[in-house]
Amino acid sequence: MLGFGVVSSAAQAAVRLPRLVGSHMVLQRDTRLPLWGWAAPGEKVSLTFQGKTYAAQPDATGKWTLTLPAMPAGGPYTMSIKGSNTLELIDILVGDVWLASGQSNMEWPLRDADNGPREIAAAAFPQIRLIDVPNVMASRPQAEFGGAGWQVCSPATAGSFSAVAYFFARDLQQRYHVPIGLITAEWGGTPAESWTSAEALKALPEFTPVVEELRSNPRDISHQVADFEAQMAAWRRSPAGQDQGHRPGAQAWFEVNYAAANWPTMPLPGVWEATPGLQNFDGVIWFRKEVTLTAEEANQPAQLSLAQIDDNDSTWFNGTFIGRTNGYNEPRRYTVPAALVKPGRNVVTVRVVDNGGGGGIWGEARDMTLTTGPRAVPLAGNWAYQIAYDRQTTPRNPFPAGAQNSPTVLYNAMIAPLLPYAIKGAIWYQGESNAGRAEQYRSLFPTLIRDWRQRWGQGDFPFLFVQLANFMADEPQPADYEWAELREAQARTLSLPRTGMATAIDIGNPADIHPRNKQEVGRRLALAARQVAYGDKQVVASGPTFEKMQVQGQEVRITFKNTGSGLELKDAGGTTLKSFAIAGADRKFVWAQGRLEGNTLVLSSPQVPAPVAVRYAWSNNPFPNLYNKEGLPAPPFRTDDWPGLTTGWK
């Protein structure tokens, strides 16, 4: 026991550094550079960099800090830190450091972007460095994070980089020829409040109860999650936790003659959380669908398409297993052998495992078909379903919406440990998970930005963000949409100083929440950076933005800012307005017709003789055709402030 104590004391006395301070790191140019680490209380620590030595004294907790003077871009350099031991850091660059954060579209790796393999092969940029913060959570601010440390950008490392952050950094590095450091801290499916500190959320009373509950619990949220996972593991080993649809000695639920007539039904495609009683259900559900085929369609291979399934599936056709796929965004397509395809009644059975968040068979109805011969039999509609076990026996999940989605927990574990490392600014791609609370986001998002700026103590550093891309289907006539309201909340945030927005309503995918064209997202963020962070007064960094509306009789004239070299319409003829709607005092919007007159638009509709309001691209998946000649789309806008769909915190 004595020997262990001696070893432990020696380890504690050794100088050590946070992950951010290491070989291959990038330090922010032209600003004071706070650095820190740990040693034994009272131990003398010195740091030598570029021929100068700086002294530091650990406090009572063992933490030491020092500040290097501002220095220009350059490198590579070495750094030496001495205490009772010596640490030597190599290949250090001085340039611009950007924090990249948000949810899955920022997390999306380069290997899965458009032309991923080709982009990776060309990713030889030794002046770009990246460090990634692992996905962790905590109830209180943390001092450290784990992970691999700084990596040099190369074809061997770039595949796992955030695609948006990589393309952003590549554009800036090639333009300004200075090193670029990327700190990525992102987690798919997470809301903005998870990335905001407890102190900042106090300004939004609706979050106070949850924040106080987290902070008052003596067990950290990560330990609470571990407790629940241990309970679930024990439950799965128990008889109650066995899948009732596939028990030894019992008829399996995928068998053709299994009596499923009394199963409830739900419409598919769609996540099962929309079904009463399943709002917070994560686990296993079996689905069955009967399909009737003609004799001509039978006895030949068929193609089964099940859109997308969240998260994993196992699929049977007429009682025979035909395949499984893992991943909530992967298309489900299976070949059914001819011998299984019968005339008359056929049964499709799908076992779905959902690990958190939305669950079920989702996507587009047109992607749910059984194709045999020339006919594609539609499978969208009601499916019978059954939960795989008695829900009453399952341990209670303390965080049914996902622990990582709790307010403050990602700020505590993934942002707080970065402080006060000097940065140039931040890029942010998030909002999908707050789309049902757009009114709240109007204050929440600016609160997050002010919070980060205050904690870094660097003033109003540049904060650039991506407006939500086009996604999901639209109604045939103008309507209210949660995603449109969230985009408006994002655009309102431009009232904060030194912010910039990259509009993406023309480069998304209506069938995929993760569009693959991350190249253009990164390029548009880089345009914003050139203007906001680098002071380029000549660059056109945004599409045309609404300035004012004038009613002229039965017509409305719209004037824009950020017109660049002029407005243009992008469609086959270059003359047709699309995605514009107009309304009178009755607040009923109809599609508008109109014309382009220089840098203004004139709109009208015979159905609206006295127009009072205009909306543009106000939908999930608009057809944006208004651009400036620099090729940037006009962001969505509305001239009214009539109540919409989203209020409060659901």
Image (spheres, rainbow, N blue to C red):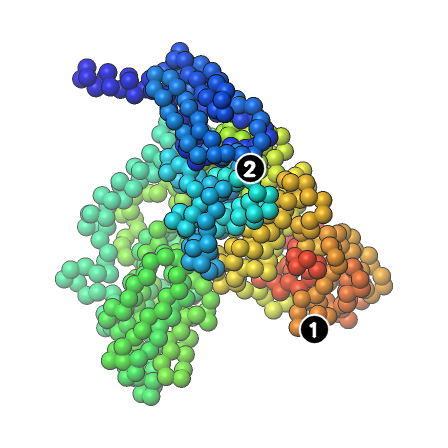
- Sequence-earlier tag: 1 or 2: 2
| Residue 135 drawn above or below residue 252 | above
For this rendering, which residue is in front, 287 or 131? 131
- What residue is shown at x 58% (from left), y 52% (from top)? 523
- What residue is shown at x 42% (from left), y 19% (from top)? 63
Label for residue 573?
A: 1
Q: Position of residue 95 (x, y in %)?
A: 54, 36
Res 47 quadrant in image = top left
Residue at the top extreme, as displayed: 42
| Residue 316 drawn above or below residue 178 | below
Residue at the right extreme, as displayed: 553
Describe residue 612's horizontal placement relative to residue 371 as left or right.
right
Quarter of the image for the N terminus: give it. top left
- What residue is shown at x 80% (from left), y 62% (from top)? 598
Label for residue 96?
A: 2
Q: Secondary structure at mark 1?
A: loop
Q: Position of residue 78 (x, y in %)?
A: 44, 29
| Residue 442 drawn above or below residue 545 | above
Q: Amino acid at mark 1?
A: Gly
Describe residue 420's horizontal placement relative to residue 43 as left or right.
right
